[in-house]
Amino acid sequence: MENHQQCLHQMFHHQAQRSPGAIAVVDGDHSVTYRELDYLTDCLAGYLQAHGVTLDNPVGIFMETCYEYVVSYIAILKAGGAYMPLDLAYPDRLLGKIFSEAEPKVIVTKAEYVDRLDGSFAGTALSIDADQSWKDQACDPDAVADITLDNLAFLAYTSGTTGEPKGVLQTHRSAVNSYLTRYELSTYGPDDRVACNIFFVWELLRPLLKGAACYIIPDEVIYDPRLLTEFIARHKITEVLFTPSLLETTINSVDPGLVESQFSSLNVIWLNGEVVTAKLKHRAFEVLPPHVRLLNT
């Protein structure tokens, strides 16, 4: 495995310097280059720092999978903070519990969701789409000059064995090592288009650290087999991640000939999150284009 001493946001910044004009993220009709994404995340990182975010401080993201989510995530890392995902499906009681335990100074959200935070969150709630003041900020790299691979990158709440959500911490080192392992299995180039939704926070950075494009699958598309296969074909996606059950539902809900033609641009399908059955493996090899690689990690 490649020996790497850079944190996640440093890896992204260096890739942005290598391919500034390449497309980094596509979300519907909106796209941004690596140069633009690097600049915008610097601005938002500066806003977060101005509102008290320092090394290892959790910062929540409370929105759907979208372009602004990507900006928020990278900016949090650049500010020295730890990304904390907040699912829109979380009940208010759970949100209040998380805010009480994690004590985030800032939550990045959208205008349509900010009312959900009233009464339970005492810090700064930034509506990234409505409040454009963050674009006037500048990141202070000296504020995070001491960041290392052992600083926090993530704070995620899981249901745990008791059913009561608990915070799970992860450092830059563990995330970087995970990506490096995957890069040994699947390489990336400037022509690669990686479709992301499932395990979104993991998937979005993997192409962005290597110069490929992240195509965001809308939440209303990911579980509709017809819309999902059309999305892959229309955007000429080269790589995507499925849970095994989602892949099984998709290929069994669409005409086999249509699966092969609409998945013709794909080179790699990652399977993650569940056991891959022999039945699914056999079915996938029957209907998928013969050049598609199935990778299970």
Image (tube, grey):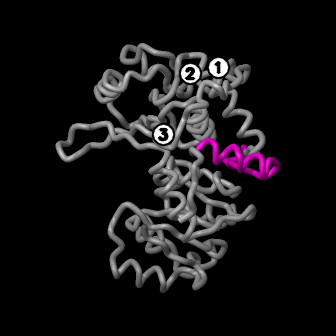
15 within the magenta span: yes
Residue drawn at 17 percent across, 43 percent down = 162
What residue sits right under mark 2 in the picture?
Answer: 126
Task: Give how far across and how far down residue 154 sits, in percent.
Answer: 44, 40
Dot 3 amino acid type: Ala
* Residue assigned mark 3: 153
Please name the amino acid that badge 1 sits on. Answer: Asp
147 lies left or right of 67: left
Element marked by disc 2: strand
Give the extent of the magenta segment. Answer: 8-30
Helix, strand or loop at mark 3: strand
Q: What residue type is labelled 2?
A: Leu
Q: Name the residue under label 1.
A: 131
Residue 1 in the image, given as x and y percentages of width and height = 53, 65
Q: Earlier in the sequence, mark 1 or mark 3?
A: 1
- In this rendering, would 22 be left or right of 280? right
**Any part of residue 227 in sight:** no
Label 1 crowd (10 A; few <14 / some 14-19 / many >=20): few
